């Protein structure tokens, strides 16, 4: 069974790798955005799904990645791939600076602090006009690179998912989940909870940072409101919740389903888009807080490493 | 100059305190951070606007309609949705109320359009010595003080108010004493929403009314209850006045755009330095 699943997964990767040869321009763009959402959802899952600390401003890392990469490309002429990786490093540095003090906060206070920090960053980016272009945004030199960006996004999504697998099956992952279930007990067992929370937070920032840079390159234009929106944080959270919080494939499943739904259906109801999204959030929270995989896991006694 | 700023700050602060008291009441009783507090305030503002537009009703009299109306809306929201996440981890209630929040804004956009509306009722200023204050702000402050005092009297003096405080101190013990906790939760959510609606009706005279006007009050109310200490009701008053003062004073030195961030920076700083609030609040 396990071998068949692995074979199917490799086949899927092969199909995805060959897709740009056949796909339409729209199809490639659709897929690369899907990869972006998988990365965002999976990264949020690493910190919040495993440790239970709700990062309510996780898009800040995406935004900082986008601006780091954008500035490096525009001001210093770096190649976009390198600049995006630098975006990942920038996001990690930010995570260190934020996480060091904020991960000591508990419960809703951590969530509010992250929410506030995201807003602070948005205003700060608008303020330093010389570097960031301020409220009028930053335009990157024109470049058509949808296919290379497709591969880069795909690799990041794959890497973050593999990372999630490695973490969940390791002692490190067990420690994180112990923190989620009972932090005091975890401390009593001798786990240095703060250190492991910080590691998880740093790892959860890299992916969004890199895809932020790639998205900036893909869209060729970034502005503060387009890369720090609260609604994107909420979207990634809902994806994870929908698929199954704390599982490996849940965030992937949630991202695929919700993003496809968004593209196929909501685009036709522009005026009621937010109402529908609100209804979906309420429905997911009330009806299936464990998510699709969470429910299946419980019902069929599936392993934790699903 | 400074005197003018201080008084403006206190005028704005009284309003913040009232709105935040509503959020603080809900948080204190249910441990639910209601992200839809601001959009509910927006509904209060629209209630005042339509009553003024259609029937020419005095905006301050419309408090008598907007508060009971939103009280019922709040009770209904609690009964239908929020009740189910009271005991869940904070992620559920944050997401749920966020979902309600965007749905409300969208419904308002659909029903009332995104046009900027205004209630042109009271213009001009009171001039007192070297100071001048817009009439609408002074009157809003007076009403905010009256309503806040009323809410406190209710909490301190009435049996129901005592039950609300008892539930926020310890749900189990309150239940053992024969208090119907579910009912108190519903009433507390209703009162919290009514306080937001009062804020909406009062700001309707001062600022442009539009579907997205509310969110900023959600954040400011978060800040106020963090400043004052979550679960500490008098703390909300101190926090509100403090926020009003800080915003006005910092506006002397900073551009409008940066001033917007002051509240958030403060929020994060206070959380880090004194997560239990400046006054002694209840730790999580």
Image: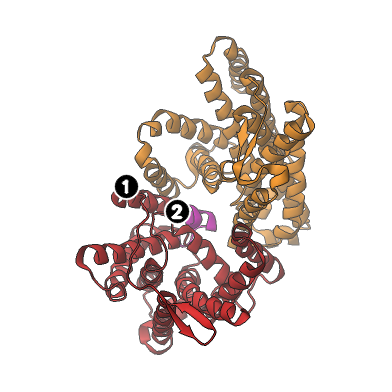
Chain of the residue under the numbered disc 2 shown in the image: B
Q: Residue at x 62, y 43 (%)?
A: A44
The magenta span reads B86-98
The quadrant in which residue B130 appears is: bottom right
Q: Earlier in the sequence, mark 1 or mark 2?
A: 2
Q: Residue at x 72, y 45 (%)?
A: A130
What colour scheme has been applied to the protein in the rendered image?
A: by chain
Which residue carries the number 2 mark?
B96
Q: Are the numbered discs 1 and 2 placed on the same chain, yes or no?
A: yes
Q: Which chain is red?
A: B
Number of residues whose C-alpha sits closer than 10 Å to that of mark 1, classed few (under 14), some (14–19) or many (20 or more): some
The C terminus of chain A: image quadrant: top right
Chain of the residue under the numbered disc 1 shown in the image: B
Which residue carries the number 1 mark?
B110
Q: B147 or A165, which lies in front?
A: B147
Q: From mark 1 to mark 2, how far is it between C-alphas?
A: 21 Å
Q: Which chain is orange?
A: A
């Amino acid at each position: 069974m396990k071998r068949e699943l692995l074979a199917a997964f490799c086949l899927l990767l092969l199909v995805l790798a060959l897709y740009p040869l056949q796909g339409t321009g729209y199809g490639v763009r659709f897929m690369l955005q899907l990869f972006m959402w998988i990365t965002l959802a999976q990264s949020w899952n690493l910190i919040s799904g495993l440790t239970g600390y709700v990062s309510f401003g996780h898009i800040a890392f995406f935004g900082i990645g986008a601006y780091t990469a954008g500035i490096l490309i525009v001001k210093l002429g770096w190649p976009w791939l390198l600049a995006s990786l630098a975006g990942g490093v920038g996001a990690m540095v930010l995570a260190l600076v934020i996480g060091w003090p904020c991960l000591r906060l508990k419960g809703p206070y951590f969530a509010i602090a992250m929410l506030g920090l995201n807003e602070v960053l948005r205003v700060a980016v608008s303020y330093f006009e010389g570097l960031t272009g301020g409220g009028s945004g930053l335009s990157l030199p024109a470049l058509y690179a949808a296919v290379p960006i497709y591969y880069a996004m795909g690799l990041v999504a794959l890497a973050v998912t593999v990372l999630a697998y490695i973490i969940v099956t390791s002692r490190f992952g067990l420690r994180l989940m112990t923190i989620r279930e009972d932090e005091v007990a975890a401390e009593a067992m001798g786990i240095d909870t703060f250190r492991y929370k910080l590691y998880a937070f740093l790892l959860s920032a890299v992916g969004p940072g890199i895809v932020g840079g790639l998205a900036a390159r893909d869209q060729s234009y970034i502005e503060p409101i387009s890369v720090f929106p609260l609604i994107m944080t909420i979207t990634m959270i809902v994806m994870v919740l929908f698929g199954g919080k704390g599982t490996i494939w849940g965030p992937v499943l949630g991202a695929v389903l919700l993003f496809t739904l968004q593209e196929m259906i909501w685009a036709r109801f522009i005026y009621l888009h937010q109402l529908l999204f609100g209804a979906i959030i309420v429905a997911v929270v009330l009806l299936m807080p464990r998510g699709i995989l969470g429910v299946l896991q419980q019902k069929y006694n599936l392993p934790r490493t699903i | 100059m400074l005197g003018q700023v201080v008084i403006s700050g206190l005028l704005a602060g009284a309003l913040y305190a009232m709105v935040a008291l509503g959020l603080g009441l809900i948080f204190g009783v249910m441990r639910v951070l209601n992200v839809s507090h601001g959009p509910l305030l927006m509904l209060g503002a629209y209630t005042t606007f339509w009553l003024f537009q259609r029937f020419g009703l005095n905006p301050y009299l419309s408090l008598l309609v907007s508060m009971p109306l939103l009280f019922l809306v709040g009770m209904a929201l609690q009964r239908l949705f929020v009740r189910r996440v009271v005991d869940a981890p904070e992620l559920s209630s944050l997401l749920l109320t966020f979902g309600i929040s965007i749905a409300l804004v969208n419904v308002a956009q659909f029903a009332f359009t995104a046009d900027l509306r205004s209630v042109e009722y009271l213009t001009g200023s009171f001039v007192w010595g070297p100071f001048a204050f817009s009439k609408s702000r002074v009157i809003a402050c007076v009403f905010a003080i009256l309503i806040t005092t009323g809410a406190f009297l209710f909490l301190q003096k009435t049996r129901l108010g005592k039950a609300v405080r008892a539930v926020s101190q310890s749900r189990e013990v309150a239940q053992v004493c024969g208090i119907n906790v579910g009912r108190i939760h519903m009433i507390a959510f209703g009162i919290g929403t009514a306080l937001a609606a009062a804020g909406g009706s009062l700001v309707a005279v001062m600022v442009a009314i539009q579907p997205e006007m509310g969110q900023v009050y959600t954040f400011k109310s978060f800040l106020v209850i963090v400043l004052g200490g979550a679960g500490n009701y008098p703390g909300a008053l101190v926090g509100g006045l403090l926020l009003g003062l800080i915003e006005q004073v910092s506006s002397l030195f900073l551009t409008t755009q940066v001033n917007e961030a002051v509240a958030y920076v403060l929020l994060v700083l206070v959380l880090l330095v004194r997560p239990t609030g400046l006054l002694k609040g209840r730790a999580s």
